[in-house]
Every structure is written in structure tokens, then in C-alpha cells.
Image (cartoon, helix red, strand yellow):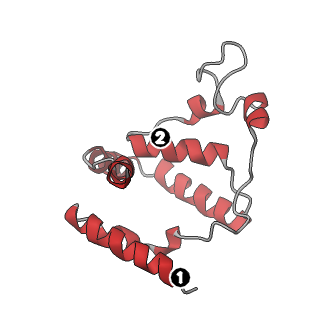
Amino acid sequence: GKLPAVVQSCLGGLMTYLKEFKLDQVLSLTSNFWRFTSASHMSLDAQVLENLEVLRNQNDMTEHGSLLWLLRSTKTAFGARLLRHWVTHPLVDRARIVARHDAVEELMTSPPAVEQMTAHLKGLPDLERALARVHY
């Protein structure tokens, strides 16, 4: 669907900024956008996250032994933040769950592609942090 004018305006400003990093094509991947108002993920409160040991274990309250610790094999800071978001906000839409599963499966069966992607990702700046610094 068509994005509201205010969103289009914000994206225009972001495009200008991303061009400086030669990353303006990132926003052309519109399949990565969805409305925040949709019920796309579960809302897990702090008690649930603690009881399920999603971020920390209950023995010594460290990350070691938690779900996040088990899954973490990220190579970049923004990958680590995205994984943390994914485990604390699980998807509920079956189609999106299947799509994510298929993407992970494809990566698991293509080690050379993963190695190549890892090499490229390690060289990228942490845009999320850079944008946050610019904002504040």
C-alpha cells in the first residue's frame, strides 16, 4: 500500500543521508517494511523473558545458557541487536515465520555464500548507531 506523506518525507531525508554511504538502494527493498500497528509479533513482558531465560539464565543472571546465548553467532553489532529484537519479539504471522525459516535454511545450506556475506558485512559501518548519533 501507499505510505503516508509524512513517512515518504522521512524516507526522502534518509535517502539523502544514505547516499553519502552509497547505501541508498537499501530502502528500495520495500518487502522489509510493514506497519507497526499490525499484530506481527508477540509482546513478551520482562517476567516472561526472565522465566523463559530468553536473555539471561536464572542461575547467575548472565547471558551464558540463555536462548540469546545459544543462538548468537552474529558477526556485526547491528546483527546482534537484530537477533536480540527477534528473540524478544517473536513473530506470530505464519507466512513471515516460514519466510524467515526458509531464509535461515538457505543460509545453512550455502556455507560459501555465508562466508562471502560475512566478509562484506564486517566492513560496513554501524548505520543504526551512526543515525542515532546524528539524531541526537
Whichever of callouts 2 and 1 sits on the residue coming sooner in the sequence is 1
- Residue 4 drawn at (x, y percent): 54, 82
Q: What residue type is labelled 2?
A: Ala
For the point 65% across and 64% down, which residue is it?
96
Tell me if residue 73 comes above or below residue 106 in the rendering.
above
Tell me: 102 left or right of 10.
right
Q: How many marks?
A: 2
Residue situated furthest top in the rendering: 60
Tell me if residue 65 comes above or below residue 110 in the rendering.
above
Would residue 114 be visible to someone looking at this image? yes
- Residue 106 drawn at (x, y percent): 50, 56
Q: What residue type is labelled 1?
A: Leu
For the point 55% across and 53% down, which residue is it?
105
Tell me: 41 left or right of 86.
right
For the point 47% across and 40% down, which residue is it?
80
Would residue 28 be visible to someone looking at this image? no
Residue situated furthest front in the rendering: 136
Identify the residue under disc 1: 3
Question: Do callouts 2 and 1 mark residues in contact (Cβ within 8 Å)?
Answer: no
Estimate how packed mark 1 is, as few (under 14), some (14 to 19) or many (20 or more) residues with alpha carbons within 10 Å.
few
Q: In which quarter of the image is the N terminus?
A: bottom right
Q: Mark 2 and mark 1: span between their CA atoms?
A: 29 Å
For the point 71% across and 13% down, which residue is it?
59
Q: In which image quadrant can residue 35 be found?
A: bottom right
Determine which of the numbered discs, if any, sits on residue 120 in the image. none
Q: Nearer the viewer, residue 115 or 95?
A: 95
Identify the residue under disc 2: 80
